[in-house]
Image (spheres, rainbow, N blue to C red):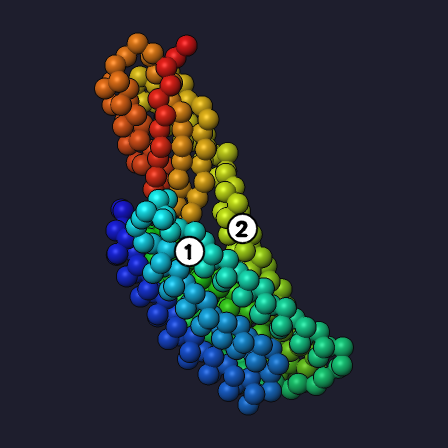
Amino acid sequence: MTVSANEAIRQGRRVTLVGVVVNVMLVGIKFAAGIWGRSQALVADAVHSLSDLFTDLVVIFGLKYGRQAPDEDHPFGHGRIETLASAVVGLALIGVALFIGIEAARGIYRHEENHPAWTAAAAAALSIVSKEILYHYTVLVGRRIKSMSVVANAWHHRSDAFSSVAVLIGVGAAVIQPDWHILDAYAALLVSFFILKVGLDITWQSLKEVVDTAPSPEVTRKIESCARGVAGVRDVHDLRVRSAGGQLLMEIHVVVDGQMTVTDGHQIAKAVEGCLFEEIEDTTRVIIHIDPEE
């Protein structure tokens, strides 16, 4: 089901604002429980949740301006604004990961002793449940409205859940066996690797889109097969596909009988266009060139 631009913005803003509320609550709970419960890993996890608030605002900005209709200055639309918003989300994750990892490594090197309490473990468990629910809700909306930045933000939520799992394991082990207090720092270090992996993936996908990287061979084969299946099409060539904000924009040359009328050629082009919009997911713009068969 196709979602209108205004409805996509509304749904994307709503799910992101829900994330803002959840993140504000978790930041307060994690910081309080991390300090009170003497857990370096949970304080690091709170910093991760704090970064979520920043990326939530970036996503809202990207949705508002990236979904605007094409205009005279932007004939192909504003989708790259959403791409840049997604890249900012990825870079923010990388920065958070480096901060947490460096602090955890220093703690391990200096043999700093942190003896976390059960309150830290309880806060981590609460974070896991709430963030996993938020991930599923956000990724569902992001895929429905075909928003790259909302889906990226969903993975930011899930990376927070993953990091809280590491915190729960490290804190739980340190609580059960106080001699294992160093596991809290190792848990924080593990958290940083989780966050770094997600941040690099999101940033890489955004950069690929910025430099107009073609979609997978599977997608291009599906596009060519769709065009060739239209009655009157003899062949296709010079297919070019790029994406902006997760939406596909393509240009394709279609070979037809050179003796047919311009009207017949135009009807074939419209049939190819209809097929591509119907069969190829996330297609928003198609340019078709009609070439005569030699």
Q: Is residue 22 visible?
A: yes
Q: Which mark is residue 207?
A: 2
Q: Which residue is mark 1?
A: 82
Residue 47, disc: none
Q: Residue at x 68, y 82 (%)?
A: 181
Is disc 2 placed on a helix, strand or loop?
helix
Residue farthest to the left? 263
Which of the marked residues, 1 or 2, is nearer the chain's N terminus?
A: 1
Q: Position of residue 23 (x, y in %)?
A: 43, 74
Question: How many C-alpha atoms fall within 10 Å of the one at disc 1: few (<14), some, or many (≥20)?
Answer: many
Quadrant of residue 293 in the image?
top left
* 185 displayed left or right of 282: right
Residue 286 position by quadrant: top left
Q: Position of residue 262 (x, y in %)?
A: 26, 18
* Label 2: few (<14), some (14–19) or many (≥20) C-alpha neighbours in 10 Å: some
Q: Residue at x 63, y 68 (%)?
A: 98
Note whether residue 205 is visible. Answer: no
Quadrant of the rendering where the C terminus is positioned: top left
- Which element is circle 1 on? helix
Spot occupied by residue 115 in the image (x, y as percentages of width and height):
65, 86
